[in-house]
Image (cartoon, rainbow, N blue to C red):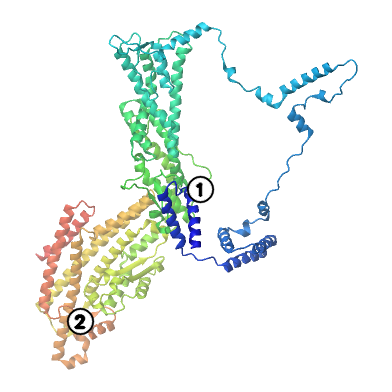
Amino acid sequence: MAFAATLTALTEELVEVITSTSSQSDPSRFNILKESSLRRLRNHSFLRTNQFEVQEKLNGFEEHFRIVNRDGLADALRERLDALERISNKWTPEALDFLLRLEDQPVQKSKLSDLKLLKEPEESPGPPLKWEDIAREEGWEQDDDIWKNVNFDRDSSDDEYFERTSDLSSEAEVTSPSTVDAQYQKSPADFLVDSQDEHSLDQVRETQLWRNTSPSKDATGRPQKITISEFHVVREVLFMLNGLENTLFDPKGNPSLRFQMKHASWEVYKALLGSFSEAGRQLFVLREFTKQPQNVPLLQVFREAVEKRLRSFDISISKLQSRYVDIQQDVVVSLTRIIDDIKPHLQPLACLSDIIQQLQRSKYPRPFHYLELLFDASGVAQLEGSDAVYEFLATLFFECFQVYLRSIRRWMETGELIDVDKAFFISSSSSQVPMSQVWTDQFTLRKTTDGTLYVPRFLQPAASKILTTGKSVVVLKLLGKYQPPSVRLQEPPLQLNGNFASTHGVFAPFSEVFNDIFEKWMASKHHAASVTLQRTLFESCSLYSVLDALQHVYLMSDGSRSETFTFAIFNNIDLLNANWHDRFNLTALAHEAFGTLANAHRIAVNVHPDGLTDDVKDVRRSVRKGLPFVRVIYRLSWPIRIVLTDESLAQYQAAFTFLLQLRRAMYVLHKYRLVSDNSAGTTNTSSDQAIYYGLRTRFLWFCNTLHSYLSTLVLGPLTAQLHKTLQQAEDVSTMIASHSAFAKQMIGEMCLGGKLDPIRQCILDMFDLTIRLQDARQLEAEREQEEAQELSRLSVMSSPMKHKRYVKSGEEEDETFLFDQDRSSMMQDTERTFAEVLSEIRAEFDRNLKFISSGLRGVARASGDTAAGKWDTLAEMLEVGIQERR
């Protein structure tokens, strides 16, 4: 209980010191903080520091110091460790462990001279007391007479001595340090003006009596207006415009209605006063804004710019006042003249006042919101033809934009962000990301909660380019290719020229003028980083070689290599090899097939776990089983992964899967070579065989047509266009966009998009029909073989190979293996006749072909996709088969 009470008391004291909250000032908050702190302290799971481990580390430091020949430092450490043992307590290991965690290269950075700083400084006894100091303090340092001998002869007298002593003391009083300082200090009496012209002073007092005069009342008891001269009204108006205290207007510019100007009706006077009152209210907004403290640099420069414009306006008003004070020529005192004189100066300030009021009315204004308002107001002033206001606002905009430009310049030149700048539209990820994801995930454009870009509206078109330039510098630094300029390159000035024109002419809108100026400024930063990174990707990282390898591996651009790889997989499937999906064998097959490619060792092939559950017999019977789960992995370096995104690689994999399924169908059709019936010993001229050969020919035509379309009309032109666009790309972002567009267009033209999924499924049905056709023909061949064996067993035994209708184009042991298997478990349609199966396959072929052709026609006409023309071409190519059938 004593420990709990002590812990509670200490916790209360800790909370009170850290949060400046006590149980008397805010009991509820104090209790919440105290309870949460107690809960954390009681339930902590941290063990005590291992004192032996701490001692071992300290001994290791001593030994290390002696090894590197720093015995003095080692002796100092040992001396203090021995002294610490005599005064240590249970918290000593904790403190030593804390210091060990703070150490930073003690061998290189430790100095014995630093130990002297730990000693307490000796108290200085102070300067010794000297007669010179006493003389200087007492004021008789320059008095030489004090050391003279006194004349005590009969000619002298005591009165003379005392008189001389009195004179010396008076001189000492005058020349003492305190009196010397005092003689330069002015008292209030020094500021009194001794006026000898009492008459003029009375005239001044008389002219100012109207300020304190009480208004008289008329017969009805209503107070009358106090009449003043126009000269006084002009004086008060100019004081008000200068922000000074006056009688006619309050600090906010509201006029006083107790006065009326001589020789003017009340309506005219009120209208004139109202005009000045409106100007005063607008100036009041500006002056109050300059008094508000600002913590954001972007707003600080705006406040300073407003102060600068107000000082310029005050100087103009002072010059107007000088005309009535220091009269050099005849001057007409007129309020209307004052209005005309200050109007050119007030118009820009009135627009600026409206901008500040809009900024203050914003509920949650962003720091750069006033830049947007200045930008819009400059465009409006230009359209209205107010050249003075346009020049004023545009100049102010560019002046304030220079501060916002500092973050942009630093990001585009060094790839670094200013941590304290929360107004910048680029943010960095708080966590470390892999180097391959630096381009996509490390730096992003900042967005608001509603998803809009946190960037000024006038910079939104250039935001992506600014982001790309900085990311290019970051990637170059990671690659070790960044070379900071020793001298900052000469950049175009970011300001308006004399005639406020752009390359589009003097009549170009302000937005075009700004875009023209800013584009020139960005070009000086963007081009160098982008070109350097592109050259690095093409030359050092061999981007073109990687793209060529992807086209060979995924898009099967080299038919011989692709057949070597895919036919080996199909052969294992047809042999019912349960380990056909072994990733080591698949990778070895890929290395053997693509061994001549650069970096072929980067290729790895495996089967997705979802495909491992499929029975090999099902994989053999359908292209939808097993084959879609074959994954080809080409390991890319992280700089190449910037251009080839994960989404693009997934699209490559989808194209590979479709081409693999197509080659499976073609493999099945070409697997057996036809042997003449005469060589088999029989003559088979049945109609079923004719139907079979006709169907086989049509399937070969369909597969070859589809293969020709993909290779000559889709993949070939697209890859050639990709190389061209990558070479002409402006920066890496354009390269990424070009490659992503290539992959997306490839998927669309290969009929693998979401819109054409029914058509793709129908094409896969056609591939499955080829396998079904060959299985039916194989079953029919076995039936014929059994019949021949019954008629002539001896002949069969003497020459068994004569009755095989098909032989494999390669090794015969695989064919023998197939005949030794249980054909009923491998083949389809074992319970149906050959004629029935052929009739059903022919019907499905015709139906699928019509559906594919008509579907492609319909989608091509209804869609605005760029691939619609290719779909229409494929439909036209397939319609040939429908017309021949008719």
Please, which residue is most extreme toward the top here? 199
Give the residue type at disc 1. Answer: Pro
Give the residue type at disc 2. Answer: Ser
Apparent side of residue 258 relative to residue 177 in the rendered image (left or right): left
Where in the figure is residue 75, as x and y percent of width and height?
69, 62
Q: Dividing the picture into quarters, in which one does residue 146 lie? A: top right
Name the one closer to the observer, 661 or 129.
129
| Residue neighbourhood size for the residue with mark 2, other residues' Cα within 10 Å, grouped as few (<14), some (14–19), many (≥20) | few
The quarter of the picture where the C terminus appears is bottom left
Where in the figure is residue 430, as x and y percent of width and height?
42, 54
Q: CA distance from mark 1 to mark 2?
A: 71 Å
| Residue placed under numbered mark 2 in the picture | 825
| Residue neighbourhood size for the residue with mark 1, other residues' Cα within 10 Å, grouped as few (<14), some (14–19), many (≥20) | few
| Residue placed under numbered mark 1 in the picture | 484
Q: Residue at x 12, y 67 (%)?
A: 846
Apparent side of residue 486 relative to residue 130 in the rendered image (left or right): left
Which element carries disc 2, helix, strand or loop? helix
Q: Dividing the picture into quarters, in which one does residue 55 lie? A: bottom right
Looking at the image, is mark 1 or mark 2 earlier in the sequence?
1
Q: Residue at x 22, y 73 (%)?
A: 622
Name the one closer to the observer, 341 or 152.
152
Where in the figure is residue 749, as x and y percent of width and height?
24, 58
Residue 40 visible to an observer of this rendering = yes
Apparent side of residue 868 relative to residue 259 in the rendered image (left or right): left
